[in-house]
């Protein structure tokens, strides 16, 4: 199976024997409405997603996993889904690269008034496409040109 296939195949992700970490964040609901790109700086020590911190084979019975030592290597960017409702869970494969023992990062995103301290929005609001005003302007120009052509043809006949 190809690398992309492993990322898109839910069964392959479920059967992955690598370590899975969990992060919980909050973001303003308006960010999701804009499908914002956010950057999360995850903690160095992360909760094991397999056992929720209880201890399992995936985390060597510790309940915790260690992310990369450097803060810059622990930054993960995600694009928020459009509607958070009560919250969503996103699964990121190989969040810290192929050399990391953590093969999946589960990010639980909940709407709130303020973003979590470890979360920041990257870039501004995406520009909303407004097709209707351009369409109306285009149609207005076409109608105006037709009116001028008809007026010139009518005037030329007199």
Image (cartoon, rainbow, N blue to C red):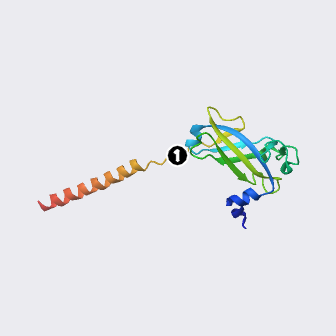
x and y, in percent, of residue 82 in the image:
57, 45
x and y, in percent, of residue 85 in the image:
58, 41
Task: Assess disc 1: are there few (<14), some (14-19) or many (≥20) residues with their C-alpha within 10 Å of its C-alpha.
Answer: few
Q: Where the N terminus falls, by quadrant? A: bottom right
Q: Which residue matches tag 1?
A: 127
Image check: 52 left or right of 5? right
Image check: 87 left or right of 100? left
x and y, in percent, of residue 133 in the image:
39, 47
Q: Where the C terminus falls, by quadrant? A: bottom left
Label 1: element kind: loop
Residue under the point 83% across and 42% down: 54
Question: Which one is in front, 154 or 36?
Answer: 36
Question: Which one is in front, 60 or 4?
Answer: 60
x and y, in percent, of residue 139 in the image:
33, 53
Question: Which one is in front, 131 or 13?
Answer: 13
Quadrant of the rendered image containing residue 94: bottom right
Residue under the point 64% across and 32% down: 114
Residue under the point 67% across and 39% down: 120
Quadrant of the rendered image containing residue 6: bottom right
Which residue occupies the extreme top position in the image? 113
- Number of numbered discs on residues: 1
């Amino acid at each position: 199976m190809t690398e992309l296939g492993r990322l898109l195949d839910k069964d392959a992700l479920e059967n992955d024997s690598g370590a899975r970490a969990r992060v919980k964040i909050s973001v303003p609901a308006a960010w999701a409405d804009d499908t914002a790109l956010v950057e999360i700086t995850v903690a160095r020590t992360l909760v094991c997603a397999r056992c929720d911190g209880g201890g399992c084979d995936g985390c060597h019975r510790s309940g915790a996993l260690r992310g990369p030592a450097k803060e810059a290597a622990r930054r993960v960017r995600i694009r928020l889904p459009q509607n958070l409702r009560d919250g969503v869970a996103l699964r990121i494969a190989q969040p810290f690269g192929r050399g990391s023992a953590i093969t999946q990062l589960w990010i639980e995103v909940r709407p709130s008034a303020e973003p979590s301290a470890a979360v920041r929005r990257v870039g501004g609001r995406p520009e909303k496409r407004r097709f209707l005003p351009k369409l109306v302007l285009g149609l207005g120009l076409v109608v105006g040109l037709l009116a001028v052509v008809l007026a010139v043809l009518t005037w030329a006949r007199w």
